[in-house]
Image (spheres, rainbow, N blue to C red):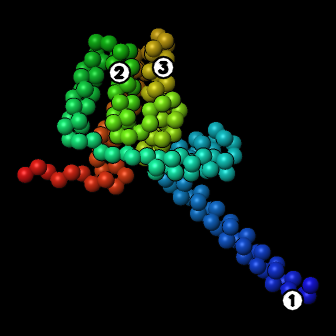
């Protein structure tokens, strides 16, 4: 190999490495912007940025294949009324209200088109479209589980209801994922 060919090969290799590093950095920035605090949580949990980013990519691809849809106005109204009932119920029986709020969030997710099997998969799916709320969803669900075992204080139950309500309201919103709100009836 001539000196000139070696130099060309080295320059080409440097360019390829620079392009690869730039693409990797862009991917990291895009995932961090999309997932927010969930990005940092996943990196901390996996202790490996590349594996965490691969997991977040996998989630996004999985949710992209789902048929997430807005709720018809009548269903939204019915669910909103059920939520108001659970909030009022909290005063008399906080533990039961939190349990029912968890169930109601799951039911709305199902109606929107999210698979609702195991909780961790639900949280992973929610993290794609609701990244700012998934951490609170996990906390609220944890409180609900502890409450079912009799291990949650009233203040924790109140906090769980607040977290569930925030996600619940977001799930009822039709404008999620670029879906326009229906036109008002004339």
Distance, label 3 to label 2, CA atoms, is 12 Å
Q: Is residue 133 visible?
A: no
Quadrant of residue 148 within the rendered picture: top left
Q: Earlier in the sequence, mark 1 or mark 3?
A: 1
6 in relation to 62, above or below:
below
Residue 33 picture location, percent across and down: 50, 55
In the image, 107 versus 176, the foreground residue is 107
Which residue is located at x 69 percent, y 46 percent? 48
Quadrant of residue 45 within the rendered picture: top right
Q: Earlier in the sequence, mark 2 or mark 1?
A: 1
Binning the other alpha carbons within 10 Å of mark 3 as few (below 14), some (14 to 19) or many (20 upward) gives some
Q: Which residue is mark 3?
A: 145
Q: Which residue is mark 1?
A: 4
114 in relation to 148, above or below:
below
Residue 94 picture location, percent across and down: 35, 16
Q: Secondary structure at mark 2?
A: helix
Residues at marks 1 and 3 touching, judged by CB atoms closer than 8 Å: no
In the image, 84 versus 8, the foreground residue is 8
Left or right: 186 in relation to 157 = left
Q: Quadrant of the N terminus?
A: bottom right
Q: Is residue 154 visible?
A: yes
- Report the number of discs: 3
Which residue is located at x 41 percent, y 39 percent? 114
Which residue is located at x 34 percent, y 27 percent? 104
Q: Earlier in the sequence, mark 3 or mark 2?
A: 2
Q: Which residue is mark 2?
A: 100
Distance, label 1 to label 3, CA atoms, is 68 Å
Left or right: 61 in relation to 109 = right
Which residue is located at x 45 percent, y 15 percent? 147
Residue 168 picture location, percent across and down: 34, 35
131 in relation to 154, above or below:
below
Binning the other alpha carbons within 10 Å of mark 1 as few (below 14), some (14 to 19) or many (20 upward) gives few
């Amino acid at each position: 190999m001539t000196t000139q060919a070696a130099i060309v090969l080295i320059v080409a290799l440097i360019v390829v490495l620079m392009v690869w590093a730039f693409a990797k950095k862009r991917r990291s920035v895009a995932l961090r912007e999309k997932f927010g605090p969930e990005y940092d949580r996943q990196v901390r949990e996996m202790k490996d940025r590349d594996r965490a980013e691969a997991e977040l990519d996998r989630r996004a691809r999985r949710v992209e294949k789902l048929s997430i849809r807005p709720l018809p106005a009548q269903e939204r109204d019915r669910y909103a009324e059920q939520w108001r009932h659970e909030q009022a119920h909290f005063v008399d029986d906080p533990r039961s209200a939190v349990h029912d709020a968890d169930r109601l969030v799951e039911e709305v997710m199902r109606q929107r088109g999210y698979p609702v099997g195991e909780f961790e998969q639900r949280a992973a799916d929610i993290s794609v479209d609701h990244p700012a709320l998934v951490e609170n969803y996990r906390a609220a669900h944890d409180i609900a589980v502890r409450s079912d075992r009799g291990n949650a204080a009233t203040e924790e139950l109140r906090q769980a209801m607040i977290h569930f309500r925030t996600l619940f309201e977001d799930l009822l919103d039709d404008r999620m994922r670029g879906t326009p709100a229906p036109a008002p009836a004339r």
